Image (cartoon, rainbow, N blue to C red):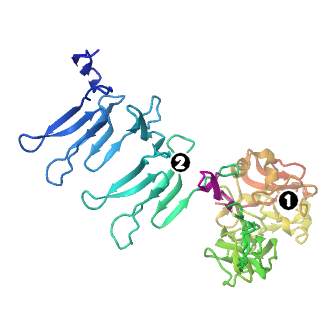
Amino acid sequence: SALFKVINDDNQIVFAIYNEGVRIYVDDGAKGAKGGFAVGGFGTSKAPSQNLLYVDPDSIRAYVSNEGAKGAKGGFAVGGFGTTKGTQDLLFVGADSIRAYVNIDPAKGPKGGFAVGGFGTSKGTTQDLLVVNADSIRAYIDTSTGKGPKGGFAVGGFGTSKGTTEEYLRVTRDSTRVYINNETPAVKGAKGGFAVGGFGTTKGDPDNFMFIDPDSTRFYVREFGSGSSSTFNIVGINLDQTQTLLMTANNDTVGIGGVLDVQNNLNVTGDIGYTGTVTSLVPTVYTLEPFDITDSSAVVMGDISSNGGAAIIVSGIVWSTSPNPTVALPTRSTDGSTSGQFTSNITGLTAATTYYVRAYATNANGTGYGQDVAFTTAELVVDFDGNKYNTVTIDTQVWLAQNLKTTHLNDGTPISNIPDSATWVNTISPAYVWYSNDAVTFADYGILYNWTTVNTGLLCPTGWHVPTDADWTTLTTYLGGSFGAGSKLKETGTTHWLPPNSDATNEVGFTALPGGLRGFMGPFNGIGDSGNFWTSTRISTDPTSASIYSISGEFMLLMTMERSGLSVRCIKD
């Protein structure tokens, strides 16, 4: 109930005060004079006052001082009660702006809104002209074909001088016009811009669909994960109000009036009655990822998907230590194909160096290039004997990519070659042997060493060491565990491993070889069947070794007699 109220002779409330606000009632009935209400403010001089707020049945007027003279300017605000103490502005009118505030808080509870309404042609009937709420702004324009003036809507902005405005947006029944400041760059001041946004799938996350500024107009078409996309259309309105599709665009095709379709692979379909010359294009080429990378070479593939409408003259790979190499460089191959995929071996590279490669193809119109792909050549490691080793980086570790072959410790001390089995059994000093004492046949597999050689700590090149069992465990953990790590480390094929070796993937480039072993009693066995590598770890009285087998993908750490002869793979310090 009202705390205070004023009642007229007809027992109608004219003015009332409530806990939640003050209400003023104006007679809007058909009969009799209409009421009105005004709030006045005193001017800067005595006597005449000026209306600040005027309310009658057909309008509400708020007056704001916008005089250029000195002194405070008037303002007007409509506030709403928030969820906490105090108020928040819903509508603010000042001398230079009108601001409407809409609650877009994602928290639960009703959301605010704001509407500007206009009176219809009959008494008491209103229609919304402008509605603002949390997810949209809607302007309503009279589009009826009957007699009478048609509605319109304009958004204006203030110019650089006082009191002069310029239109930014004008909407009428037959057109929508956006005005943008396109003065020459020599004129100072920021340039205007205009964007049409759409709401995303989550609250408050809009996407731009159309963006217009003085130097460009951009349309954005959303591409979905499924491969489909939304579509952008230009539609013509006929005199009978029917529509004609003039242009449509999605992520891979632009269509013009159902007559011409241009797809992103440059296929053109349709009959446009064109009799002029069609310009041929350069070839379309793709660069594939390099592989078999060593310290001085790599293998790179290219793929020619289109010849550009003219025969391919030459194709290949071009490379450089700088991005985006071109065929003007001498570092290029010319052994590519005229279509489809081709392979080029590039050589003469420098170790531990980053190179940039591009596939290319040339026709009569010019040269097309694939994307720029970077790779780094392997680090070149040289042992005391001058043997060279490539390296492979696996997660945080750097390993030699081949088994060790040195016959000297890294300080130059010779390692004894013990071919005789009886002597081997009794040797407690550093010793090595080639499998079956055949350095030619089994050169790829590397040398077999006893553990005394490993235990010197000087077997690997300087800056490298024989891995501990913890180093091997780090490697197999990265590969998903010891059960399948052997398959991921083994060289593929049956050049060195016994068939079928079908589980081998060598997916990290370790290229483990089955070098077999020399038993602690002297016999050789296991070539092609197992790869056995020393660790530098001793458990109790015996050292440990790592083994990989042809018959399974398992990796195993085992205790091994120290007089056995096994392969060695070094790891970087």
Distance (Cα) linking label 1 and label 2: 53 Å
Position of residue 326 measured from the top left corner of the image (x, y, whole percent):
66, 79
Position of residue 270 measured from the top left corner of the image (x, y, whole percent):
75, 66
Q: Residue at x 9, y 41 (%)?
A: 48
Q: Quadrant of residue 321?
A: bottom right
Q: Which mark is residue 198?
A: 2
* The C terminus: image quadrant: bottom right
Which is more toward the observer, 406 or 244? 244
Position of residue 528 measured from the top left corner of the image (x, y, whole percent):
91, 59
* Residue 252 located within the stretch drawn in magenta: yes
Label 1 packing within 10 angstroms: few (<14), some (14-19), many (20+): many
| Element assignment for label 1 | loop
Q: Which mark is residue 2?
A: none
Vertical order, 345 against 190 (above or below): below
Q: Nearer the viewer, mark 1 or mark 2?
A: 2
145 left or right, relative to 90: right
* Residue 455 located within the stretch drawn in magenta: no
* The N terminus: image quadrant: top left
Viewer can see residue 349: no
Q: Quadrant of residue 254?
A: bottom right
First in sequence, mark 1 or 2: give its number. Answer: 2
Residue type, label 1: Thr
Give the overall secondary structure of the magenta segment.
strand
Residue type, label 2: Gly
Which is more toward the observer, 123 or 156? 123
399 left or right, relative to 215: right
Give the residues drawn in magenta, as a range.
230-256
Q: Which mark is residue 492?
A: 1
Which is more toward the observer, 29 or 355? 29
